């Protein structure tokens, strides 16, 4: 028996975020296009050789993207949005980045969350007359690169149904599936080109199969794949992030050479496939978790795989559950991490070794991997028995909480009146989401402090100088509710995790969020509590500089949970309640310090929504309870804000309303203010600030653009409940961009106030 190991995708950013460095140097004019493309080529070749050395039999090709793999999929079928005026057959690198980042005259493609991950993809735009034509050159070039290195390559394509489903119809309403015949024809051209270039296998990803789909979508699979399988490499149809058991009969009957199942997220689904699995198909078992960083328990994995190997023999493949895009690169580089904790971890490189070990165990028997099994068993026992995991005081606090849902004392209208009595805000109050530009000076001070080159007092003085700068600039701009700018924060999750018990941090555990944006998720390994105040001194100092209200800024419990690598030995709901209780301590301390406007950000609320509808009500119940717990007990006059971004929110507006935040700020600019349509159908009763411009693009919006969006909002949201704000925080922008955009925003807000006063 010979087991094949393969990957669905690999971290493209590099061990030291080399891709991020290349991109940002190129955008800043420090390297030209040739330098960028050469650096990217060297990086992906390095990754292929690493995989080959680790014994991976088939390495993915086409998973490496300069910005986003969904954007790349659009371009492979010649579907650049016509509003940009680009020729897909002659698309330049500069034009590619304009699609992703926008240009002064054209906003970028909308961003959305990639299923229930924190990766952001660029949303395809479909029109009724969208035409497709294969543009295989980029993919063929990468295939030839891998072949030249002696790497057995498996091209990876986002499947046609998933690509269509993930996109958004533009113009007059139409059925997106009407585009499928033309799209399938383009895919056939791509696959034919790959076969002619020597690709024996091609992986086609259809992750939407893990969703609850309208029947027309799975019904379209068989006719589409009957065409795709002609004159093509052998096709491995891959789905992940959940169970596809309801489609088992359909998938087994498809004319493909193999199926990949996510057996880490949904191990039970194998029962729907294995009994009558076709003799002409391979089965790829995704048994290594591609979404989390815990070391695999090898003995149970072997127990899971042994009956599959007995039935399938050489037709059993092993792989991670999904692309390793969502995992950090290499835990071996974490030389400063606590040795015990490090022994519990497996990043992408370690996951390659786990695959290799499982392959050897299946082929040669358990005795051949006795040492590896012993090491895995020891790590599992050590982790379960470690006193650093469980703390009785946390459990006791949770058990003593009242079972009342943690509601505010009074309904929103009563609270709003009390808040306005002291805030005395004008109509259409203007604010920002929280962060201001993280300049090179700020980063240099933080690095010097961490390296011991800057004393604590000197670091505080440096940050206070930046806070004062942010306050003075906001006052000059005329904003009504200010923020301190978050100069002292490295990341909205990492900053809090560093100060909460139960979290650990890596030096290089980066994952890609979008484009060049990388995040370093904390490792949430144990019970969570707050040893002491985290933000109070900074907020108190900022408030001392101005008579205008300054928001206290916190990251909410759901987001701290979702954007961490979370322990897998407790229900996520219980972990989230622990975080919420710790945050409630901070909220109460902020209120006691005189900070009476407090923002608890929850951009990950929608992201955490289960893919299956049957599981959603339960999740929304405990997530909402956790948010309300985080602000339990605050006075009616304390104004609670929350913020959400880069997801679709229409289907969970009732749950968002149930959070009962006084003010909701939410991304809408990049999604064409789509939320306003949803608000027209659902009566959201609290205050809301739909973002009026996109901060993820370097383009500065014009006053006319902002005015049109605000006028659109006023048709749905009463003026007395409408706030004015950007889509998100300004951390990634420079001061000139931030000030120009905010100046236009404030100016338009004042004009509209005057118009409202005249018409009153």
Image: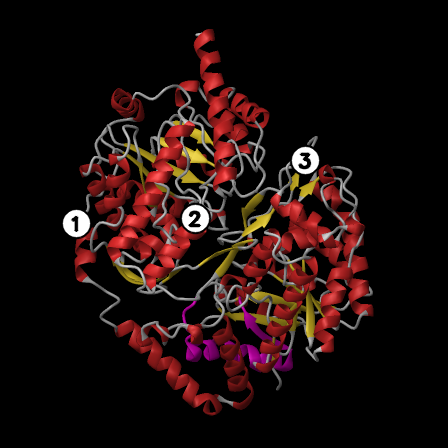
Looking at the image, tell me whether mark 1 or mark 2 is earlier in sequence order: 1
In this rendering, position of residue 401 left or right of residue 708: left
Indicate whether residue 579 is drawn in magenta.
no
Residue 244 vertical position relative to residue 295 in the rendered view, above or below: above
In this rendering, position of residue 44 left or right of residue 686: right
Residue picked out by circle 1 = 400
| Residue depth check, mark 1 versus mark 3: number of the one nearer the observer | 3
Residue 10 vertical position relative to residue 147 in the rendered view, above or below: above
- Which secondary structure, mark 2? loop
| Residue 280 shows up from this direction | no
Specify the quadrant that holds the C terminus.
top left
In depth, the one of 511 and 526 nearer the eye is 511
Specify the quadrant that holds the N terminus.
bottom right
| Residue 125 shows up from this direction | yes
In this rendering, position of residue 589 left or right of residue 213: left
Whole-percent x, y for residue 502 in the image: 28, 61
Residue picked out by circle 2 = 438
Residue picked out by circle 3 = 170
Whole-percent x, y for residue 325 in the image: 54, 62
Residue 377 vertical position relative to residue 117 in the rendered view, above or below: below
Neighbor class of circle 2 (other Cα within 10 Å; few <14, some 14-19, many 20+) is: many
Residues under numbered marks 1 and 3 in contact, where contact means CB atoms less than 8 Å apart: no
Residues under numbered marks 2 and 3 in contact, where contact means CB atoms less than 8 Å apart: no
Indicate whether residue 300 is drawn in magenta.
yes
Q: How is the image coloured?
A: secondary structure
In depth, the one of 492 and 360 nearer the eye is 492
**Disc 2 from disc 3: Cα separation:** 36 Å
Whole-percent x, y for residue 31 in the image: 63, 58
Label total for image:
3
Question: What range is drawn magenta here?
Answer: 293-321
Whole-percent x, y for residue 23 in the image: 59, 56
């Amino acid at each position: 028996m010979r087991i094949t190991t393969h990957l669905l995708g690999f971290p493209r950013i590099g061990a030291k975020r080399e891709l991020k460095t290349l991109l940002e140097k190129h955008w800043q004019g420090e390297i030209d296009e040739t330098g960028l493309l050469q650096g990217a080529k060297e990086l992906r070749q390095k990754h292929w050789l690493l995989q080959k050395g680790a014994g991976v039999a088939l390495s993915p090709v086409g998973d490496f993207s300069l910005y986003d793999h969904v954007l790349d999929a659009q371009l492979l079928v010649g579907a650049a949005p016509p509003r940009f005026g680009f020729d897909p057959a002659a698309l330049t690198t500069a034009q590619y980045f304009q699609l992703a980042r926008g240009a002064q005259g054209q906003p970028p493609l909308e961003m959305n969350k990639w299923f229930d991950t924190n990766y952001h993809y660029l949303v395809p735009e479909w029109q009724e007359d969208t035409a497709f034509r294969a543009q295989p050159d980029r993919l063929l070039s990468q295939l030839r690169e891998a072949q030249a290195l002696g790497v057995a390559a498996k091209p990876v394509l986002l499947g046609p149904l998933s690509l269509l489903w993930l996109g958004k119809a533009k113009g007059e309403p139409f059925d997106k599936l009407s585009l499928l015949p033309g799209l399938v024809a383009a895919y056939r051209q791509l696959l034919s080109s790959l076969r002619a270039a020597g690709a024996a296998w091609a992986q086609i990803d259809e992750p939407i199969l893990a969703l609850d789909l309208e029947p027309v979508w799975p019904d379209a699979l068989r006719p589409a794949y009957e065409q795709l399988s002609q004159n093509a490499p052998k096709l491995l149809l891959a789905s992940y992030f959940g169970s596809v058991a309801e489609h088992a009969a359909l998938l087994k009957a498809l004319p493909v050479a193999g199926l990949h199942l996510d057996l880490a997220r949904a191990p039970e689904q194998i029962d729907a496939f294995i009994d009558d699995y076709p003799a002409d198909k391979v089965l790829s078992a995704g048994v290594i978790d591609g979404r989390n960083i815990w070391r695999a328990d090898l003995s149970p994995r072997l127990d899971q795989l042994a009956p599959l190997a007995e039935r399938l023999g050489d037709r059993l493949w092993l792989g991670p559950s999904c692309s390793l895009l969502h995992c950090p690169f290499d835990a071996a580089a974490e030389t400063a991490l606590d040795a015990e904790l490090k022994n519990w971890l497996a990043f992408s490189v370690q996951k390659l070794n786990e695959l290799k070990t499982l392959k050897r165990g299946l082929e040669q028997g358990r005795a051949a991997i006795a040492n590896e099994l012993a090491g895995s068993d020891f790590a599992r026992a050590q982790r379960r028995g470690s006193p650093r995991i469980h703390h009785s005081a946390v459990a006791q606090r949770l058990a003593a909480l009242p079972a009342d849902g943690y509601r505010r004392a009074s309904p929103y209208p009563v609270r709003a009146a009390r808040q306005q009595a002291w805030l005395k805000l004008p109509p259409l109050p203007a604010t920002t989401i929280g962060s201001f530009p993280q300049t090179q000076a700020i980063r240099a001070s933080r690095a010097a402090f961490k390296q011991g080159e800057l004393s604590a007092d000197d670091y505080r003085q440096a940050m206070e100088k930046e806070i004062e700068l942010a306050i003075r600039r906001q006052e000059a701009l005329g904003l009504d509710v200010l923020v301190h700018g978050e100069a002292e924060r490295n990341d909205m999750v990492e900053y809090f995790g560093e100060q909460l018990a139960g979290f650990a941090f890596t030096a290089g555990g980066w994952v890609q969020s979008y484009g060049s944006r990388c995040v370093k998720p904390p490792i949430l390994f144990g019970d969570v509590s707050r040893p002491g105040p985290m933000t109070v001194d900074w907020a108190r100092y900022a408030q001392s500089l101005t008579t205008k209200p300054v928001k206290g800024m916190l990251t909410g419990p759901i987001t701290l949970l979702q954007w961490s690598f979370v322990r897998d030995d407790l229900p996520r709901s219980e972990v989230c309640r622990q975080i919420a209780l710790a945050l409630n301590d901070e909220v109460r301390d902020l209120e006691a310090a005189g900070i009476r406007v407090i923002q608890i950000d929850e951009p990950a609320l929608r992201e955490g929504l289960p893919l299956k509808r049957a599981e959603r009500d339960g999740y929304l119940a405990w997530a909402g309870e956790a948010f309300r717990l985080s602000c339990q007990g605050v006075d009616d006059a304390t104004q609670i804000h929350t913020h959400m971004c880069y997801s679709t929110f229409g289907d969970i507006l009732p749950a968002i309303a149930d959070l009962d935040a006084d003010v909701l700020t939410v991304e809408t600019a990049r999604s064409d203010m789509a939320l306003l349509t949803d608000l027209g159908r659902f009566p959201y009763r609290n205050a809301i600030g739909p973002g009026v411009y996109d901060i993820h693009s370097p383009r500065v919006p014009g006053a006319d653009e902002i005015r049109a969006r605000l006028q659109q909002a006023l048709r749905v949201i009463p003026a007395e409940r409408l706030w004015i704000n950007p889509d998100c925080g300004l951390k990634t922008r420079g001061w000139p961009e931030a000030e120009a955009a905010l100046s236009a925003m404030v100016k338009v807000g004042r004009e509209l106030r005057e118009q409202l006063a005249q018409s009153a």
